[in-house]
Image (spheres, rainbow, N blue to C red):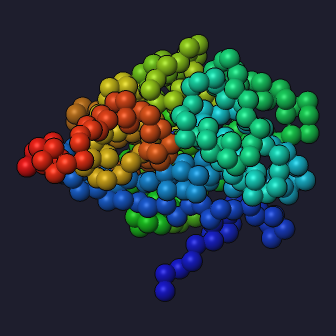
Amino acid sequence: MPKVWHGLIREYKDFLPVTDKTPVVTLQEGNTPLIPTRRLNMAINPDIEIYLKYDGANPTGSFKDRGMTMAVSKAKEQGAKSIICASTGNTSAAAAAYGASAGMEVFVLIPDGKIALGKLAQAMAYGAQVLQIHGNFDEALTLVTEISAGFPITLVNSVNPFRIEGQKTAAFEVIDQLGFAPDYHFLPVGNAGNITAYWKGYQEYLAAGKSRKTPRMMGWQAAGSAPIVLDQIVENPSTVATAIRIGNPASWKGAVAARDESGGKIDSVTDEEILAAYRMIASLEGVFCEPASAASVAGLIKSNKAGLFNPGDKIVCTLTGHGLKDADVALSVIDTPQTVDAKLPSVLKALGF
Ligand SMILES: *Cc1c(COP(=O)(O)O)cnc(C)c1O
């Protein structure tokens, strides 16, 4: 019998700030696949080993569930009745889902017209009160921070330390699944909570004797939205990868520490590179992620071209969210199907038989 998974709080409770009294709000998140690649690996570099940590397989389709199970459980423990967040989309979907499960009121502020439709549909379906603002994510985050300071509402953005605690479990899973820490870990960087969380997780597993080393942390921003790379706030960030369209990351310092302490790098990739990687991951490996997620693989391709790797290097790329969240992008950058008459000759002709 395979082991039953109880959600990441129960599985990793020894590493998390919870007690037996913490009311666990879970959708059985975590335990996502670590997929060894074959065709993608061959196309990029046959001498290295590439794995995809597919966090799009979480209950709401992104890694945000890892942080949200912790943030909402702790909010419940502290007696909160409502939660609030700013979001580029996935945080609102996760907050709305876990809030619904906990029976809490959920308030969400999103940038007007700049979030993927699937994510908006999720937040609405889970019953959150969603408000679009004429402004970007950074402005939305400032607003919800002020609201949570003035009213009895818990802020569940990644400035909430319990979010980082939950998200660090992805690093534990990588080591548990691989049996060791990889040489490099690639991931997209937006608000920079996730790279901060992974680095914390890798260090804690090392300290606990669960691994012998830590990977180099390789973070990737979109070129039009790369404040950490430029070392300055970007006022009007722009990229097709809406989940990382952030000009003033809340965990900026954490990301820089992860980079410097691990001997890694934070760099940028263009939208063209992101979309090329996005298509390769889906068409070569059968794994559909959202555009922002593909920044990790785009960064890997760029690093490989620059000659970074040694033969035998083990590399993990996090795919942060599911491709179905942003089907519009797929259909606009890839193609829409041809339509023909429902007659055998027409169909055969169109299929090229
Ligand atoms: C939130 C998100 C990111 C960015 O993660 P940060 O922790 O903000 O750096 C990347 N990809 C997806 C799909 C996301 O939802």
Q: Quick check: which quadrant has ligand 1?
A: top right
Depth check, front residue: 16 or 59:
59
Q: Is residue 184 visible?
A: yes
Compared across the picture, whether 118 is left or right of 127 comes to left
Q: Is residue 191 visible?
A: no
Depth check, front residue: 189 or 284:
284
Q: Which residue is drawn at 34% across and 39% down?
A: 278
User: Residue reaching furthest left?
Assistant: 353
Vertically, is 185 above or below 303? below
Q: Quadrant of residue 272?
A: top left
Q: Residue at x 38, y 48 (%)?
A: 288
Total labels drawn:
0
Depth check, front residue: 333 or 20:
333
Compared across the picture, whether 64 is left or right of 104 comes to left
Compared across the picture, whether 152 is left or right of 29 comes to right
Vertically, is 145 above or below 69? above
User: Residue reaching furthest top?
Assistant: 235
Q: Which residue is drawn at 47% across and 66% down?
A: 176
Image location (x, y in percent) of residue 261: 51, 40
Image location (x, y in percent) of residue 236: 56, 14
Depth check, front residue: 60 or 117:
117
